[in-house]
Amino acid sequence: QVQLVESGGGLVQAGGSLSVSCAASGRTFSSYVMGWFRQAPGKEREFVGAISRNGASTFYADSVKGRFTISRDNAKNTVYLQMNSLKPEDTAVYYCAADRGYTLNSGPYKYDYWGQGTQVTVSS
């Protein structure tokens, strides 16, 4: 089992940048595909991106491709989401999630563990 804790959310102006992190407990972090999702008020949880176990592969939603970057440091049990050129529509609670499988999945039902989320607000 793994426990996930996000941090680094906040308020930023449109066009700005923000980085959020997700720290995982346990000694098997490198055994999980890690994903980022977001949920805005009144909307369903939306896939943002995912990164493979060793960090060599990433997969992004079209809405964030070219603006967001996911990376991970398995020695620190941490996955990162760097967000650039932020837009007001990026405002949401951002969640990290861990998948025991090998495929980079976009469906939230594929993920086994979830963090509590961190709020990101982009002002216009």
Image (cartoon, helix red, strand yellow):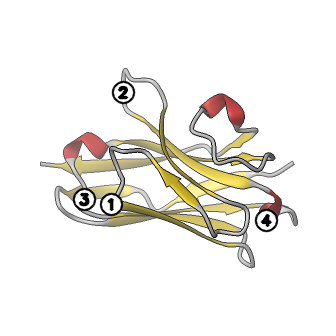
Single out the residue that lies furthest toward the top: 42
> Do callouts 2 and 1 mark residues in contact (Cβ within 8 Å)?
no
Disc on the earlier residue, 2 or 4: 4
Q: Which residue is mark 1?
A: 66
Please give left or right for residue 88 compared with residue 96 in the image.
Answer: left
Please give left or right for residue 66 compared with residue 99 in the image.
Answer: left
**Label 3 element class:** strand
Disc on the earlier residue, 2 or 1: 2
Q: What kind of residue is marked 3? A: Val
Q: Residues within 10 Å of mark 2 (few under 14, many from 20)?
A: few
Disc on the earlier residue, 3 or 1: 3
Compute the Cα span from label 2 to label 1: 25 Å
Q: Is residue 53 above or below residue 124?
A: below
**Label 2 element class:** loop
Disc on the earlier residue, 3 or 2: 3
> Is 64 or 94 nearer to us in this picture?
64
> Do callouts 2 and 4 mark residues in contact (Cβ within 8 Å)?
no
Q: Is residue 110 above or below residue 44?
A: below
Q: What kind of residue is marked 2? A: Pro
Q: Is residue 33 above or below residue 90?
A: below
Single out the residue that lies furthest toward the left: 124
Q: Nearer the viewer, mark 2 or mark 1?
A: 1
Residue 88 badge: none
**Label 4 element class:** helix
> Do callouts 3 and 1 mark residues in contact (Cβ within 8 Å)?
no
Compute the Cα span from label 3 to label 1: 19 Å
Q: Which residue is mark 2?
A: 41
Compute the Cα span from label 3 to label 4: 31 Å
Residue 12 badge: 3
> Is 66 or 43 nearer to us in this picture?
66
Q: Nearer the viewer, mark 2 or mark 4?
A: 4
Q: Which residue is mark 4?
A: 30
